[in-house]
Amino acid sequence: MLDTYQLQTFLAVAETGSFTAAARRLHLTQPAVSRQIRLLQEHLGVRLFRRAGRRMVLTHAGERLLETARQVTQLAQRAEEEMAFLRGEVVGRLRIGGSGLPAWYVIARLLPAFRVACPAVVVQLEPLPAGEVDLALRDGKLDLVVAEVAAEERGLSSILLQSMETVLVAPPEPRWEQRKRLPLRKIGDVPLILPARGTPARNFLEGIFASREIALPVSGPGLEVTDLGAALPLVAAGLGATLFPHPVLEVTRVPVHPIALWPSFSWTIYLVHRAPPASQAEAAFVRFVQEQGDTLLR
């Protein structure tokens, strides 16, 4: 009979691409991960991985096992959660993907109260790869996503967590420090550091500017960042300006100059989840946000 612990190890290697990364995820040693994969291969009588450069990639047999392994481990986890639910507890692991600094800012305001409400739920925070919001949830790589854009795919639902005023963040230079407000139509005159193409933040900004019939400028220094927080030190160094939610800027303490935009627009952050949630832990977090989110995020 298949060992669910070995299947969890198999999934970690398949998703991270290495024994070392899988060991970090599982809080194990690399030899322990190697041993579990060796035992699983011996039990099944097939080779599940082959080396391609520095990565471990699935063989044909490994690809055939992948979806079954996910289903078995999810069913085992669900059984444990159901029994805990009968005892009046919420247990499990939540893998929450965040799109960058604005998302982490919102998550940080929610997690302390959630951990008090559900202390047996282990929360694992992960960066969200560009363009994979819907895919990561559908394939079970993540349980929840916090990002700038709402879900568009069937079977997913979104909750607006927070709307924050967006400002132009400029270098602390005399030519900027005298300016208090900038018309949005003048944004094309500003060398911008933008979120990378395909990221939720970039999709959000492109949607805002398209709705205002204003072209989002892509010229200037030619700098793009996958995490918007990385733009702030670049701005402070005088390499350009960026667009940023003002409340998040206030907690970063980076020496930059915020400039109000006119007309203004809000930077949105959503919780994207499966509908219905796939586990008791997911359902508990969604319910927690619906009941307490407005109060915690004021």
Image (cartoon, rainbow, N blue to C red):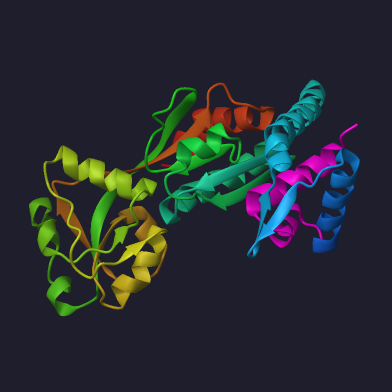
Q: Is residue 49 left or right of residue 222?
A: right
User: Considering depth in this image, is 73 or 159 the residue closer to the camera?
Assistant: 73
Q: Main secondary structure of the magenta part?
A: helix
Residue drawn where x is 66% and y is 36% of the image: 117
* The C terminus sits in image quarter: top left
Residue drawn where x is 90% and y is 45% of the image: 42
Residue drawn where x is 73% and y is 51% of the image: 49
For residue 67, above or below residue 254: above
Quarter residue 21 falls in = bottom right
Q: Is residue 255 visible?
A: no
User: Considering depth in this image, is 224 or 204 the residue closer to the camera?
Assistant: 224
Quarter residue 123 falls in = top right
Say whether residue 6 is magenta: yes
Question: Measured from the top left, where is residue 207 in percent x and y?
Answer: 24, 41
* The N terminus sits in image quarter: top right
User: Considering depth in this image, is 60 or 88 the residue closer to the camera?
Assistant: 60
Say whether residue 26 is magenta: yes
Question: Measured from the top left, where is residue 189 in percent x and y?
Answer: 10, 63
Q: Is residue 213 left or right of residue 13?
A: left
User: Considering depth in this image, is 211 or 42 the residue closer to the camera?
Assistant: 42
Question: Where does the magenta region start and end?
Answer: 1-29
Q: Is residue 139 left or right of residue 64?
A: left
